[in-house]
């Protein structure tokens, strides 16, 4: 008996066998999703059983569509802290603001959850090579997990990817190709190359195993809150994978009766690249792709996100919303998070703070609501941006007098 029933097209409903490498539905070109047997899963795992296991994402392994657990490729990703904000919450007038520190994953971003699941699936299906495209973090994560699994890894990145991200991919042994174009250009090339060569196309929602890994974010948050969902789960979105995955995770727990209510999915995009926020606000089913994304949050500069149909469904089902915030709002959140909580995220990782600030000011969020912001990527992977925001440091001659002089002039 298998926990994995099929991979099912979200549009036309065609089902494909679980052990076939499917990217898009061969009938209608839409994305596919894993169908799992939850009765079977519930018979194998319980809340109390979970407590005996290590706190990483594979603690929830029965929920992840890897048939044979010996194929799991792990660096102990997941199991990241959920902390209650003190100073930032107070500043924003939020009494129950929590921060999920997912930048503390092995490669510095939440992308490790999807990459661990994808590398495990590649091992299970005996695929030699993973082909990714990425604004940066997903490529770094793929490179690390492919290395750990002994697989080949190729990553196509747009020319906005930071040098730290590119360097990380390369030290893990990945072949990195910088495309003189956007994320969508990189994706198009990666797709054609992987289809032609029979390799795993490891792109966002198009590789459905990715959000099966990401949904562990929801399980962890609920478990850390003593088996309840937050009122809001807030996440910055590019393609939308993590938010889609988290919604799936909350729904699964709800259907199993492990939690009593769902979390609203709050998504944030940058104004300079907000195709999903704009379509959502206008009530449209189709997005208008952004051909020239422009934002300081390079990790979420995705002009034509393949996750839109799934993300729209997740946000609507959960009663959530998708907001666009300006680069100034993102920079403010980036600084606030660091200065008030000691958390150095990259701009996309801090953007959820801009979302809650905006919604609180508009009166769409109450002071008592329990809000979890996912801090998705570490700031150290993009120091050029940080220096742009904070400026160059003061330099002095190597003597005490120069330092005293500085402080007596008010440098504190
Ligand atoms: C730090 C960070 N946050 C958020 C996102 C958005 O993730 P997704 O494209 O799955 O929506 C990314 C994507 O690269 C990221 O690197
Ligand atoms: Zn279909």
Image: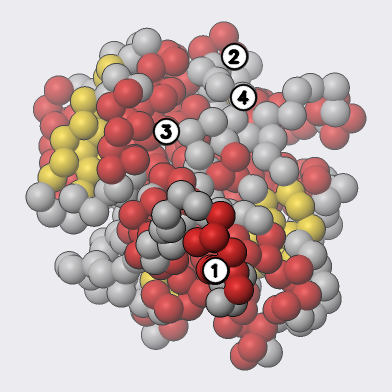
Residue 57 is labelled as none
Q: Secondary structure at mark 1?
A: helix
N-terminal label among 2 and 4: 2
Residue beneath disc 2: 69
Dot 2 alpha-carbon crowd within 10 angstroms: few under 14, some 14 to 19, many 20 or more: some
3 and 1 marks in contact (CB < 8 Å): no
Q: Quadrant of residue 384?
A: bottom left
Dot 1 alpha-carbon crowd within 10 angstroms: few under 14, some 14 to 19, many 20 or more: few
Residue beneath disc 3: 141
Residue 77 location (% of width, % of height): 59, 30
Q: Secondary structure at mark 2?
A: helix
Dot 3 alpha-carbon crowd within 10 angstroms: few under 14, some 14 to 19, many 20 or more: many
Residue beneath disc 4: 76
Q: Is residue 46 above or below residue 186?
A: above
Residue 113 location (% of width, % of height): 53, 35
Residue 405 is labelled as 1
- Residue at 18% from the left image edge and 46% from the top image edge: 186
- In three-dimensional space, the C-alpha distance between marks 3 and 4, rounded to whole angstroms, equals 13 Å
């Amino acid at each position: 008996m298998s926990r994995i029933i099929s991979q099912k097209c979200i549009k036309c409903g065609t089902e494909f066998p679980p052990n076939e490498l499917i990217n898009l539905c061969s009938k209608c070109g839409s994305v596919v999703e894993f169908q799992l047997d939850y009765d079977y899963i519930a018979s194998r795992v319980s809340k109390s059983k979970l407590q005996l296991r290590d706190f990483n994402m594979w603690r929830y392994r029965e929920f992840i569509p890897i048939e044979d657990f010996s194929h799991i490729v792990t660096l102990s990703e997941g199991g990241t802290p959920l902390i209650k904000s003190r100073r930032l919450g107070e500043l924003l007038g939020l009494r129950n603001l929590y921060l999920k520190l997912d930048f503390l994953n092995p490669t510095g971003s939440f992308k490790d959850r999807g990459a661990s699941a994808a590398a495990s699936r590649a091992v299970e299906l005996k695929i030699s090579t993973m082909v990714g495209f990425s604004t940066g973090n997903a490529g770094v994560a793929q490179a690390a997990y492919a290395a750990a699994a002994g697989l080949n890894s190729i990553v196509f990145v747009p020319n906005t990817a930071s040098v730290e991200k590119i360097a990380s991919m390369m030290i893990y042994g990945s072949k990195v190709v910088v495309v003189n174009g956007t994320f969508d250009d990189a994706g198009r090339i990666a797709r054609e190359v992987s289809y032609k060569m029979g390799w795993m196309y490891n792109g966002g929602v198009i590789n459905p195993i990715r959000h099966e890994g990401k949904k562990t974010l929801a399980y962890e948050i609920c478990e850390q809150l003593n088996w309840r969902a937050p009122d809001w789960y807030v996440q910055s979105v590019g393609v939308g994978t993590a938010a889609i995955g988290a919604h799936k995770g909350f729904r699964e727990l709800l259907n199993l009766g492990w939690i009593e209510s769902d979390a609203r999915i709050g998504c944030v995009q940058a104004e300079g690249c907000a195709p999903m926020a704009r379509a959502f606000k206008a009530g449209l089913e189709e997005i208008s792709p952004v051909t020239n994304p422009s934002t300081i949050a390079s990790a979420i500069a995705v002009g034509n996100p393949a996750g839109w149909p799934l993300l729209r469904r997740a946000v609507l089902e959960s009663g959530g919303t998708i907001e666009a915030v300006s680069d100034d709002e993102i920079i403010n959140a980036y600084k606030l998070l660091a200065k008030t909580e000691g958390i150095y995220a990259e701009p996309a990782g801090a953007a959820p703070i801009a979302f809650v600030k905006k919604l609180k000011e508009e009166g769409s969020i109450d002071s008592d609501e329990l809000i979890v912001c996912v801090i998705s990527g570490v700031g150290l992977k993009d120091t050029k941006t940080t220096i742009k925001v904070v400026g160059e440091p003061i330099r002095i001659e190597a003597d005490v007098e120069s330092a005293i002089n500085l402080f007596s002039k008010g440098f504190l």
